[in-house]
Image (cartoon, helix red, strand yellow):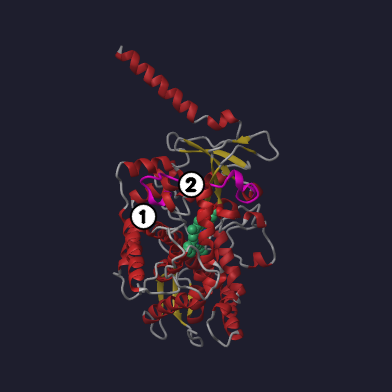
């Protein structure tokens, strides 16, 4: 009897495995031979590759427009065609409006109210409410705070250098500290200087959030690609301490502001305005968040504000710090581009009475090209994901993507595909000037209704950092020209061994 049971269990297991891992074959799609049981995540599990590079490797292994892959047992579709990716994100958004990373309404605050995780109408309603916080008028209001943090970074680097000295800096550390302080001040509304107070509360918690421990890599990957496993972890009580600590900081700040009636020009203020007045004001000079009698039930709880501000931190920290650092690195290896960028910054300031204003930064056009080229070669997020929300006939074929299928778009794949970007490993800002690329394939901020809500803010943060560096320091490499190797962990692209450049003070320039 026992033998019979065992044999039946084994037969069922074999049948289940075969059935699961032949999904794409059965549906007639081209597919990537799965490594059982982890599928494309096998290289992530064995720490041979980060999530982005593991998916990129599959992208490079074929020429098909779509490839069936397995995220552990979950069949997902990797899209390799730029136009199809665009259609999914924009034209056919109604069939792909979710990210497919919603985990658990009951136990997971991010799924309950975080814009990145929400589905369908809940997402749409929150997006409409939050969008007015990211207009150029609101960004102008926050610009002085961003600039102040840029000056703190310049002060820090300057104090490390003698007038004639040259020193090596790990740019991800310098620009990561800058990004933390930007988030702390512009998003959480806290006045910190992590350059001189490296033990402040925000920085300490942030270190915990970003530590690439085994646990955080597993959780990060599952959140993105295997929500049911993430749900199991949460239900089993595997708590991540750092997000809760970060949310606590935000909650405390809101309560303090509400009690003391403090008003500042930052994102927290705008979300408090939404909570207390029912909407974010279209008037860019109106930052008041004093409750009015008109709003009887608050449209946003403190917990949802805290959850979204935490998400802004996650979405904004690594992306801005990396893009600024990779740009500094590429400029250090391209003396012609470096000189052009320095002139561009100087000339833009010249047009604005040598004042470092929002308008002057907008005029730094060559710097824009540099940032575009960096976001191409090193997309802040290496993949985009969506879930098919209704059966979708694949254009020009008999195949149908079934409702519920996870969709992965490899930005690293598209952006480094020579079919779309000739000589893709060459960092060449001018390719955008001379249209030497396929526009459909360039999607560093996503596309369609669910693209990055803070694209403008992200660009400004990166631009201010780079403009301040270019004005005040010479940038050079410590060794000969080389390619950055992508680290084998984490969801965002990170450089193995850091991003090291040498800085020295510029003689004729000073911080404007
Ligand atoms: C240069 C820096 C940045 C890059 C490259 C970047 C990139 C992206 C990408 C690729 C997405 C996914 C879009 C999609 O699925 O179509 C995204 C979404 C998002 N980003 Fe950014 N981002 C940056 C900065 C920021 C900053 C500073 C914030 C917050 C203050 C932010 C907040 C968000 C949010 C909330 C979403 C989700 C939007 C939604 O689901 O409606 N990002 N970002």
Give neighbour class at mark 1: few <14, some 14-19, many 20+ (Cα, 10 Å).
some
Query: Which dot, 1 or 2, sits closer to the camera?
Result: 1
Which image quadrant is residue 436 in?
bottom right
What x and y, as percent, mark residue 41? 45, 42
482 relative to 408, above or below: below
Label tally: 2
User: Mark 2 — residue?
Assistant: 54
What x and y, as percent, mark residue 511? 48, 84
Give neighbour class at mark 2: few <14, some 14-19, many 20+ (Cα, 10 Å).
some
Q: Which residues are magenta?
A: 87-111
Q: Is residue 416 visible?
A: no
What x and y, as percent, mark residue 45? 40, 43
User: Mark 1 — residue?
Assistant: 212
Q: Is residue 123 visible?
A: yes
Q: Secondary structure at mark 1?
A: loop
Q: Secondary structure at mark 2?
A: helix
The answer to whether residue 511 is magenta is no
Q: Nearer the viewer, residue 158 or 148?
A: 148
What x and y, as percent, mark residue 451? 56, 56
The CA distance from mark 1 to mark 2 is: 17 Å
């Amino acid at each position: 009897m026992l033998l019979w049971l065992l044999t039946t269990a084994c037969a069922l297991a074999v049948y289940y495995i075969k059935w699961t891992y032949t999904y794409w074959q059965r549906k007639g799609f081209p597919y990537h031979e799965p490594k059982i049981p982890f599928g494309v995540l096998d290289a992530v599990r064995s720490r041979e590759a980060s999530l982005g590079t593991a998916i990129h490797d599959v992208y490079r292994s074929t020429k098909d427009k779509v490839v069936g892959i397995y995220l552990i047992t979950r069949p997902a579709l990797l899209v390799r065609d730029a136009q199809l990716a665009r259609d999914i994100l924009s034209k056919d958004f109604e069939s792909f409006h979710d990210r497919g990373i919603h985990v658990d309404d009951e136990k997971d605050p991010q799924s309950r109210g975080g814009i990145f995780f929400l589905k369908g109408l809940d997402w749409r309603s929150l997006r409409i409410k939050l969008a007015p916080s990211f207009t150029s008028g609101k960004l102008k209001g926050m610009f002085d705070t961003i600039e102040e943090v840029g000056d703190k970074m310049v002060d820090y680097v300057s104090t490390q250098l003698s007038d004639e000295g040259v020193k090596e800096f790990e740019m991800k550390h310098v620009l990561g500290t800058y990004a933390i302080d930007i988030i702390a001040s512009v998003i959480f509304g806290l006045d910190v200087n992590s350059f001189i107070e490296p033990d402040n509360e925000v920085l300490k918690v942030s270190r915990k959030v970003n530590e690439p421990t085994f646990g955080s890599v597993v959780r990060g990957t599952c959140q993105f690609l295997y929500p049911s496993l993430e749900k199991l972890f949460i239900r089993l009580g595997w708590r991540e301490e750092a997000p809760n600590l970060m949310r606590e900081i935000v909650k405390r700040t809101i309560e303090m502001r509400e009690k003391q009636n403090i008003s500042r020009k930052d994102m927290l203020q705008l979300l408090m305005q939404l909570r207390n007045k029912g909407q974010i004001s279209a008037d860019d000079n109106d930052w008041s968040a004093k409750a009015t009698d008109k709003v009887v039930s608050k449209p946003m709880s403190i917990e949802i504000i805290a959850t979204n501000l935490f998400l802004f931190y996650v979405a904004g920290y690594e992306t801005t710090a990396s893009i600024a650092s990779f740009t500094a690195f590429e400029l250090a290896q391209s003396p012609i581009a470096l000189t052009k960028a320095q002139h561009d910054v100087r000339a833009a300031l010249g047009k604005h009475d040598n004042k470092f204003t929002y308008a002057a930064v907008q005029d730094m056009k060559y710097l824009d090209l540099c940032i575009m080229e960096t976001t191409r070669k090193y997309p802040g997020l290496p993949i985009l994901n969506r879930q098919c929300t209704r059966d979708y006939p694949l254009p020009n074929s008999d195949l149908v993507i079934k409702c519920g299928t996870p969709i992965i778009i490899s930005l690293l794949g598209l952006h480094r595909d020579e079919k779309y970007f000739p000589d893709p490993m060459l960092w060449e800002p001018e390719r955008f000037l001379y249209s030497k690329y396929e526009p459909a394939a360039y999607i560093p901020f996503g596309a369609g209704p669910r693209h990055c809500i803070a694209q403008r803010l992200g660009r400004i943060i990166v631009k201010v950092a780079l403009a301040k560096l270019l004005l005040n320091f010479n940038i050079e490499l410590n060794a000969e020209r080389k390619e950055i190797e992508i680290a084998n962990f984490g969801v965002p692209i990170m450089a193995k061994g850091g991003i090291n450049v040498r800085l020295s003070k510029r003689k004729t320039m000073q911080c404007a």
